[in-house]
Image (spheres, rainbow, N blue to C red):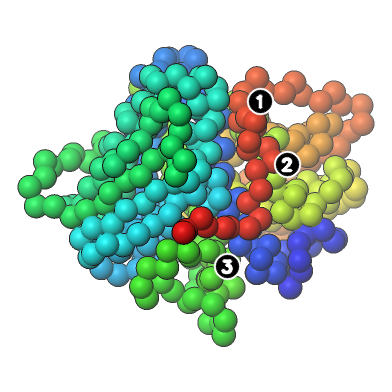
């Protein structure tokens, strides 16, 4: 195993090649890719269509995906049951709660009652800073968005389950123990909640039912999560092959959330608006997540090896669901291709949809985030793929090229916290 990916580019690189602590750190980065997605799309919606459109898409993306990936994670990790313990365990693998950036803590009080709370919430802090602690903005994110989406997530485990706040924003002064605390419970006298209309469309996708290849057993670490709730669970607790698969699952979960988000946007604002926003979103978020991936993987430089290595670990390209390959032709010339796989026949939306539906835009954003003078063009024939390429791109670094103009939204994505947020170690603050 390698401590990181700082050495030579390897066409056959696998996540299991990384050592355990680096792989766990990478898993937290993939979880964070969901929040980076939100920071790159939600401001576009608000500035173009207004706050109500932003709220609608936010609710649709979570309610249209979290019941699916909640079930997927429970199935992968053998998390059985339908009580509050099951709900809290599933929360520990929810991409909406990226470890370290949203510091979820858990307490199980009985099979039918428990709590979670956040001493630190990067999402809330970002909104609070941007709006100068505007109560309406805090209410939007912590009431209008969270009320329906938290319920949808817990109801994926048990239709009798609900989340209710003990306290939450808006705040004049943020409480010393953190911005919010919630109760999760099972009840009998509850009003039925209708499913989000986006949910059935996402459920019909191949991504929703995709199965990863079987994994090997391991001597150390958890092969599943069939045991009791671990309030201090960390990704490091998983066995190495299970952790590698979980990183792939997090990436697929981000895709499911993007699929739900853009299904909502297409319905409300049209197909062309959705594709335009997708392209701008990738331009906005690529510099941020590429910067973060460089740090966890130890990838320096801006030559073709750096470009190809960063594409190999891109969290928006879910491995196995997207079967891709790379080849280095020289220090300034490379190839990327996609082989026959589920993603190609799945009416993909989000950034994956750009590769299939807008190949001329394709990988331009993440490639340019590594080297602004690199150009990525669709390729009709890719000999390096041995006849397996369905889609292919030629990547060429040309010193005569002018770097593309940066997205106006990148600064919002980076914020004051996300660019350098440290996710290398997952610490808790239990007393």
Residue visible at 82% across and 58% down in the picture: 6
Residue visible at 39% across and 37% down in the picture: 61
**Disc 1, SS:** helix
- Quarter of the figure with the N terminus: bottom right
- What is the C-alpha distance between the residues marked 2 and 3? 23 Å
- Residue situated in front as seen by the camera: 372 or 4: 4
Mark 1 and mark 2 residues within 8 Å of each other at the beta carbon: no
* Left-right relation of 358 to 254: right
**Disc 3, SS:** helix
**Disc 2, SS:** helix
* Left-right relation of 184 to 408: left
Is 398 rendered above or below residue 249?
above
Q: Earlier in the sequence, mark 2 or mark 3?
A: 3
Q: Earlier in the sequence, mark 1 or mark 3?
A: 3
- The residue that mark 2 highlights is 291
- The residue that mark 1 highlights is 411
Q: Extreme bottom residue here?
A: 219
Residue 318 percent across, percent down from the top left: 55, 53
């Amino acid at each position: 195993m390698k401590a990181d990916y700082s050495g030579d580019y390897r066409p056959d690189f696998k996540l299991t090649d990384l050592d355990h602590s680096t792989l766990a750190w990478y898993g937290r980065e993939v979880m964070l890719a969901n929040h980076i997605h939100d920071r790159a799309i939600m401001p576009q919606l608000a500035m173009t269509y207004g706050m109500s459109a932003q709220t609608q898409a936010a609710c649709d993306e979570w309610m249209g995906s979290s019941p699916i990936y909640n079930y997927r994670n429970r199935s992968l990790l053998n998390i059985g049951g339908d009580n509050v313990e099951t709900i809290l365990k599933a929360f520990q693998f929810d991409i909406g709660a990226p470890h370290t950036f949203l510091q979820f803590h858990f307490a199980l009080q009985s099979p039918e009652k428990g709590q979670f709370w956040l001493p630190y919430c990067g999402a809330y802090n970002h909104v609070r800073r941007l709006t100068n602690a505007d109560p309406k903005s805090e209410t939007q994110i912590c009431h209008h968005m969270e009320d329906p989406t938290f319920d949808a997530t817990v109801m994926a485990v048990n239709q009798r389950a609900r989340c209710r706040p003990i306290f939450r924003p808006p705040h004049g002064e943020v409480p010393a123990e953190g911005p919010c605390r919630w109760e999760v419970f099972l009840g009998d006298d509850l009003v039925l909640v209708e499913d989000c209309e986006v949910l059935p469309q996402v459920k019909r996708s191949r991504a929703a039912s995709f199965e990863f290849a079987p994994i090997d057993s391991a001597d150390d670490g958890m092969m599943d999560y069939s045991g009791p709730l671990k309030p201090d669970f960390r990704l490091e607790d998983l066995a190495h092959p299970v952790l590698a698969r979980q990183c792939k699952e997090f990436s697929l979960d981000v895709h499911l959330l993007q699929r739900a988000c853009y299904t909502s946007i297409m319905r409300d604002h049209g197909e062309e608006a959705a594709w335009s926003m997708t392209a701008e979103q990738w331009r906005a978020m690529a510099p941020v997540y590429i910067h973060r991936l460089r740090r966890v993987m130890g990838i320096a430089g801006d030559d073709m090896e750096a470009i190809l290595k960063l594409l190999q670990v891109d969290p928006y390209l879910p491995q196995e669901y997207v079967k891709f390959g790379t080849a280095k032709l020289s220090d300034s010339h490379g190839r990327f291709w996609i082989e026959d796989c589920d993603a190609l026949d799945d009416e993909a939306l989000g950034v994956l949809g750009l590769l299939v539906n807008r190949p001329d835009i394709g990988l331009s954003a993440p490639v340019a985030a590594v080297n602004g003078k690199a150009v990525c063009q669709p390729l009709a024939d890719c000999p390096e793929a041995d006849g397996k390429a369905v889609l292919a791109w030629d990547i060429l670094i040309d010193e005569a090229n002018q770097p593309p103009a940066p997205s106006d939204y990148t600064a919002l994505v980076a914020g004051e916290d996300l660019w350098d947020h440290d996710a290398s170690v997952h610490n808790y603050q239990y007393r």
